[in-house]
Amino acid sequence: MAKISHHAALIYTMMMVSASDRNMSDAELGSIGDMVLHLPVFEGFDRKRLPKVGADFAKLLQQDDGLDDALSLIRKALPKKLRETAYALACEVAAADGKASQEELRLLELIRNHLDIDRLTAAAIETGARVRHRTA
């Protein structure tokens, strides 16, 4: 299994959530692009590489055990201090279109467990994402 950068791991995490319900909405894709463009954690990432990282991720998911392999790659690539960040980005993508599908919620649970995010921290992150995307 290949090694990926922490930037790729964060992008894989976001794309995984967006693709989980087989409906990568414009809102979700826009949210991913905005986060890669503006968040400090992506400093030093060549944004022109985003399509390549996305294509690599799609190829990985098509393989046998692609989801498990992706989760393992993500965990190995992320230092502990960025695991909560990855979960927060995943929650932002799930909330971007105003609704989280059952598939997205289940995947968030898998990500949370795989990255060892404690339940209280996860609840705070989830609430923050939900209220940021709430409409009047």
Image (cartoon, rainbow, N blue to C red):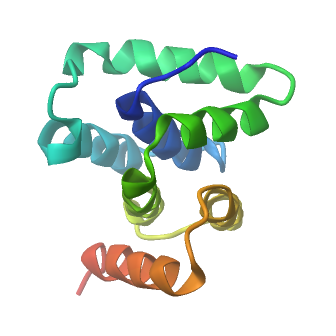
Q: Nearer the viewer, residue 46 or 5?
A: 5
**Where, quadrant-wise, is the C terminus in this rendering?**
bottom left
Question: Does 79 appear above or below 120?
Answer: above
Q: Nearer the viewer, residue 96 or 16?
A: 16
Please state if 10 lies on the left or on the right of 114 as rendered: left
Q: Is residue 135 above or below residue 64?
A: below
| Residue at 60% in and 22% down | 58
- At 42% from the left and 41% from the top, the residue drawn is 10
Q: Position of residue 102 (x, y in %)?
A: 70, 67
Q: Residue at x 62, y 56 (%)?
A: 111
Q: Quadrant of the N terminus?
A: top right
Residue 93 shows up from this direction: yes
Tell whether 122 sits left or right of 8: right
Residue 33 x %, y %? 26, 37
Q: Quadrant of residue 128?
A: bottom left
Q: Is residue 13 left or right of residue 86?
A: right
In the image: residue 129, left or right of residue 44: right
